[in-house]
Image: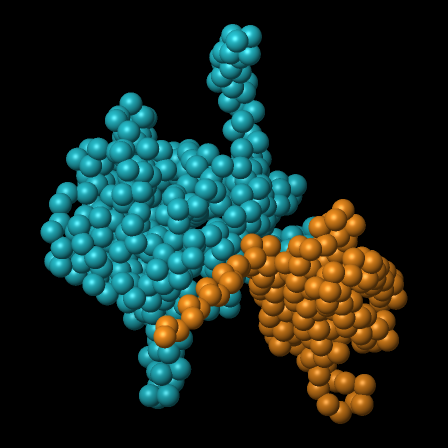
Amino acid sequence: MTAPALTAAPTRRTSTVFVATAFVAAGASMLMGSMLAMWLDFRAKAPTRVASDGVSLIKDWLKRDVAIPEVAATTLMITFVIACVMAQWAVYSARRGDKSHTTLALAITMFTGLAIINAQIALWMQIDLVLRNDAYETMFYAITGTMMAIIVSAVVYSFVAMFRVLAGRGADHDVLRAHALYWYAVSGMFAALWFVVYVQK
Amino acid sequence: MSISVSGAPSATTAQRAANSPVQRVTGWLTTIHHATIGASLLVASALWLVVATVIGVVLGFDRLDASSAVVDAGALTQLFSLHRFALVFGVAAPAMLGLVVWSLPAQLHAANLSLSRLAAFGWWSWLVGSVTVLVSYLGNGGPGGGDAQYVETYLLGLGIVLVALALIAVSVAATVLTRRNGRALSDVPVGAFAALVTALGVVLTLPVALGTIIYVWLDYVNARVAFGGADLIDTWLGWVTREPHTLLVVVPALGVLADAVVRTARGRQPLRGVVLIGVGISLSVVASSATQQAHVFAPGDTPTGTLQSLVPYALFNLVPLLAPLVVVLLSLLALRAGTPGISGAFVAAFLGVGMIFTGLVGSAAMHLDALGLVGTVFGEATLVYVVYGAVLAAIGGITLHAGSVTGRALPDGKVVLVALLGFVATVLASLPHYVAGFLDQPANVASGFDDSGLVGVTNVIVALGHLLMLVTMLGFVGLVVTSRRADAVTDRYRVEQPA
């Protein structure tokens, strides 16, 4: 009477692409985090002025005549949610071996990213800041420009992932998981930027 | 029959073609093999070491007489800045990451790095970036530079260097995390663990500097109201080339010592887990780097005030000291527990980590307000201690892994001599400035201070120390070149067994 031998558990493989993407996302998060920290530091050290109510004192950081296009900024934020859902849908479809939906999900993610870029450019045009006057303007364009570069990298990632699926590498789920992770990270970074730069101002 | 007859000459022709200079250069340019990429980084860091030592010699002799100048006063700020760049991003970072790239697959028994193309891209990007920085200095750019275009070129080059090092670090981290051949992370050689720690540190801190560069650059080309002009660049970015941040770059030195001692003691490390914790403590530096703060301890008027100053000081300056201290002490413990023999790798690594520790202790002392060392040459000495310590550790690391990577071992006796020479060079190039710091010799200037007595002598000794480090490096390069004719090591992995 001997106990049946247990079969060995499948070896859990750590994906190189996933790990590397996590590190890149961490680095990008530190980049944006540090820029936001310096933004907050400069804002905290800005002189004060009387607010529009004529009583309270506020930081003279965002100039009186500059209006943040809040609708465009909030629309941008919401669009990131769509991109994340689509990126996760791509992972779900790939797990089910559904190539057409995987491709569709990645295409929508990519075009959502392009829409985000378009919205960011529209926001720059609406706010109409001149990059020559003070610290706010310099830092505004530096931080939003860096965010734009990170968004572009996410769109490129979506394009590459879609191209791989179209080329028959749909079974390579690690790339799609890593792609989704990157979009989550980029969305998190933008959420922080949105709150600090566009909401708190 | 016809196949064998026609096949033999064609193979010979192919072999000859593969060995032709053009093929070798093409192969080097396009290689993704870890040994070639790592060796390229190591050679390039040796070339930057020549630059750093020559600048050290020039600055030392320039400060011999505070009333006359060898170097134009307008260029001094740039020369000091270039010296720091050369030491950290020209020597320490590529030497440590190069050593890791060169030896990591052998330590993990892997064929190559993960994402080796990324590592190759990082190496070439670092080369382009570092040359760009050098050119920018030659064109009157860099911090304190007078030519606006070359100041921008400097920022561009520095940005490329930072991104390149981060890319190499991503490849290193991915290798350690995904190519362990089924081993737990706690079972990999300490060198591989230290590589992961330094990769994490680099990925988490260099983007912080990159963000600052973006701000500084955009401000510099426009209003110059937020971050100032070229003179203030080092105010914003100086933390990258100061202690304790440099510890993150030189963590692989701790791994070299921990692995070398096991080989020397011919036994096991009794407290291996504590060694790993000690190496991991280095990551505490991320806190000070990410916040870009240097905390000076100054006793307050009340106990609460004193505590408010002491806690961040201890966190940012004293905690990182534990990393090299733990590794050094446990190395001695391992030696005591085993039956030690002579090992060039151990001697070089031990002296190197000792120098790094001395530099970090100096940095902690410098941040004590009561000593009044901030703004003196004391700070220059701490950096030289750490970087030259890293050079010594790199010598130890190359010696330790030469057998497994190249199949040719280095002679222990000669390596010991080179390491001792390097030790003397490091002490001469830095200890006198510890003394001069207490004598209030100001940093980053070559005139306007009292050069009589001991201060003048210290500057000459420092110059000689830099010169001796150059000799050390040349001596080790000579050793490596001659070792290529040595007998092959029988068992390539005999030194890579986990402790």
Task: Work out whether residue A161 can be spotted.
Answer: no
Residue A104 lies, in percent from the top left, at 83, 60
Q: Residue at x 75, y 85 (%)?
A: A50
Q: Is residue B18 above or below residue B143?
A: above
User: Relative to A153, is B196 on the left or the right?
Assistant: left
Task: Work out whether residue A25 can be spotted.
Answer: yes
* Residue at the front extreme, as displayed: A1
- In-front residue for pair B205/B269: B269
User: Relative to B7, is B457 on the left or the right?
Assistant: left
- In-front residue for pair B320/A38: B320
Q: Quadrant of residue B197?
A: bottom left
In the figure, the shade used to draw chain A is: orange
Q: Is residue B353 above or below residue B318?
A: above
Residue A170 lies, in percent from the top left, at 72, 54
Considering the image in quadrants, where does the N terminus of chain A appear?
bottom left
Q: Quadrant of residue B106?
A: top left
User: Relative to B151, is B180 on the left or the right?
Assistant: left
Q: Residue at x 55, y 12 (%)?
A: B3
Q: Which chain, by letter, is cyan?
A: B
Q: Residue at x 79, y 89 (%)?
A: A54
Residue B367 lies, in percent from the top left, at 35, 66
Q: Is residue A179 above or below residue B112?
A: below
Q: Residue at x 62, y 77 (%)?
A: A44
Q: Is residue B358 above or below residue B18?
A: below
Considering the image in quadrants, where does the C terminus of chain A appear?
bottom right
Residue A95 lies, in percent from the top left, at 70, 64
